[in-house]
Image (cartoon, helix red, strand yellow):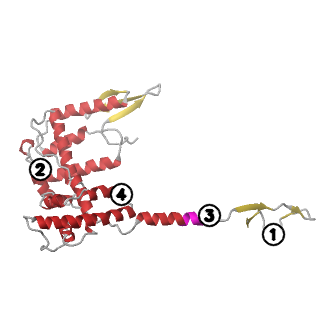
Amino acid sequence: MPRRTDRPAGMRARRGRKGVLTYYLVRQDGSKLVLGQNLELAYARWVQEQRSLVQLARPTTAIELLGCFEQCALPLSSEQAAARRRAELTTLRAFFTEHDDPALESIAGEELFLAWYRNDSRSSPSDTAIRMFRLVWMFALQLEIVKSNCPWKTFDLRKIQLKLEAADVVCQFASPPLKEFLEELLCKTTRTSVKPPSDVKPEYSERLQVELTLAISRAVVMLRKCGRPDLIAPVHQLKVDELLLLRNSSVLELARPPGAIFLDHQRTEVLASLRTETNASGHQTKPRTLQRFNRTASPEGDSQFPGSVGFTVEEQ
């Protein structure tokens, strides 16, 4: 009988005479540890047992610590969440493998990881991988495997990514010089002469802000037409000063949107038109009734049907 994948490794269940399930753990040496009849308590005892084994093993390198973290992690009920966790751990394992599996006490800040990530293509975002490593380090702190706080600082690209998505929307309705600036910010142009000077003059910034206000008003109208009200608030919150600071940020390359946002389909108007056509065609459809012919007996005694046999459909 195959093992159920929703239970952690080694956990089994046995049904007693009264139909009650009892959970137990099969150790590597073949012995069994009874975990009880309550599933939540059984999970807690399973985690406690795995953590005691990790404390005895005392991992000393980054890859060993990642393996111990996976050993003590319960299966996730969501397949998407489980896939994200696998991708994040795979990214961390690839990074530490390429850097010779450093000892835990020699791991420095996240700058080396970000530099490596820029030159590599991974399925998980860099900020989620950093959050996963901080979670792994907290796990090591709880088991007293390490004594110091995590050397990688908290890192969140979601707000910057949302701001760049809003800039991508506004760029479609912007006029020069704002359009050129936003295209350079989003890496949509190969020209190098559109970069504003490092010391931005107030006149240039004010002109960009005026163009931004006009472009925002046009973008909001189109966002409502295409059914993307979720981007209206981020678009309204765009400020030129923040975009200028973001242009020189070291995380800009990691936060750029991977694709383009198309707003010329006018989804809301198309759906409304389809609903109108559907309702109009529904009113024009004529109801149908079924008329059944009675059977008549022929002189020879055979049953006969006038016209078509069985049922006919008539239009009222």
- Does residue 128 appear in this view? yes
Q: Residue at x 37, y 61 (%)?
A: 224
Secondary element type, mark 4: helix
Distance (Cα) linking label 4 and label 1: 60 Å
Q: In the rendering, at what x and y percent does residue 33 appear?
A: 30, 28
Secondary element type, mark 2: loop
Q: Earlier in the sequence, mark 4 or mark 3?
A: 4
Secondary element type, mark 3: helix
Q: Nearer the viewer, residue 29 or 292?
A: 292
Q: Which residue is mark 2?
A: 110
Q: Earlier in the sequence, mark 1 or mark 2?
A: 2
Q: Which residue is mark 3?
A: 283
- Does residue 30 appear in this view? no
Q: Quadrant of the N terminus?
A: top left
- Residue 281 lies in the magenta-colored region: yes
Q: Quadrant of residue 15?
A: top left
Q: Nearer the viewer, residue 172 or 261?
A: 172
Look at the image and give the residue range highlighted in magenta. Answer: 277-282
